[in-house]
Structures are given as C-alpha cells and as structure tokens.
Image (spheres, rainbow, N blue to C red):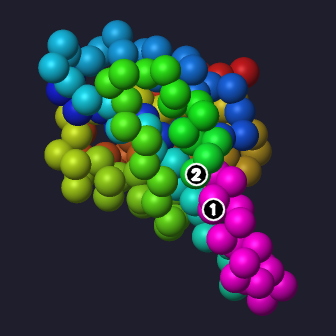
Amino acid sequence: MYTKIVVPMALDHGLSPVTLAVAEKLLSDDGQIIALHVYDLPESAAKAVLDKSMLEEGFARAHSLLHEKTAGYSNVSARIVRGHTYRSIVDEAAKEDADCIVMGSHRPGLSDYLLGSTSARVVRHAPCAVHVCRGT
C-alpha cells in the first residue's frame, strides 16, 4: 500500500476514472491522492499568436474541468501546474515525496516509438514506483 500517490490526468480522454480507481485500490487507509494536471505551455510560435487572456482562459477551463473530474473523491486533492508534461509530473512527485505515480497511457503510435511517450519518460525518470494503466 502507498501513502501518497500522484495521478497525472490528461483532461481530454476517459482514463481519469480508471487511474483514480487504481490509485484508490493501492492507497493505504490514511493515504492521500494528488490528481495532477499539467497545463502544457504552448510553443513560442503559438504564444506569438495567442494573447495572454486566451492562455489564462484555457488555464481556467482546465482548472474547472480537473475539479469536475475529481469531485466526489474524498481522498483526492486536485492540483494544476504549468510546465512541460513529463518533467512536471516527475518534479511534483519528488516535491511531494510521493511513493507512487498512477497514470494512463494510450496505445503507442509511430511518433511514440521515435520520441517516446509521456508515460515512458515518467517511468524512466520518476523517483518512485509507477503504475501505467493502458488505454485503448
């Protein structure tokens, strides 16, 4: 059983309920789950086109959706951070002294074989155990 589990949540697919359910099963009675969404900052070319209010509106929308997806879970605290996805997940797990990360992963495509998926990078760099739930 784990005492502190970080559950990275991509808000645009249906794996969140699965990963939260797995985390709940792995959690000790007095444990804590941190549902983490990383608001990936746009590349500099996109930043030139988007104004600051559009970026803030997107962040607020993501914050609201994260809280919707975690409503009803008594042992889950929701957190959103800005940054690069895999690096932010690893950094937050280390900062929180988490003993486990439970995350979803899609079936790999060609670009994943060439560049590596987020979950593969987290597995390689995480300071703790990582459970990967395969999506469709």
Q: Which mark is residue 59?
A: 1
Q: How far apart are the two marked residues, 2 and 1, measured between alpha carbons?
A: 6 Å
- In the picture shown, does residue 52 fall above or below 42? below
| Local crowd size for mark 2, using a 10 Å CA cut-off: few (<14), some (14–19), many (≥20) | some
Q: Residue at x 66, y 46 (%)?
A: 112
Q: Position of residue 57 (x, y in %)?
A: 71, 66
Q: Residue at x 19, y 16 (%)?
A: 28
Magenta span main SS: helix
Residue reaching furthest right?
49
* Residue kind at label 2, given as amino acid type: His
User: Is there CB contact under 8 Å for labels 2 and 1?
Assistant: yes
Q: Which mark is residue 12?
A: none
- In the picture shown, does residue 84 fall above or below 44? above
- In the picture shown, does residue 17 fall above or below 63? above
Q: Residue at x 58, y 51 (%)?
A: 63
Magenta highlight range: 46-62
Query: Which residue corresponds to mark 2?
Result: 63
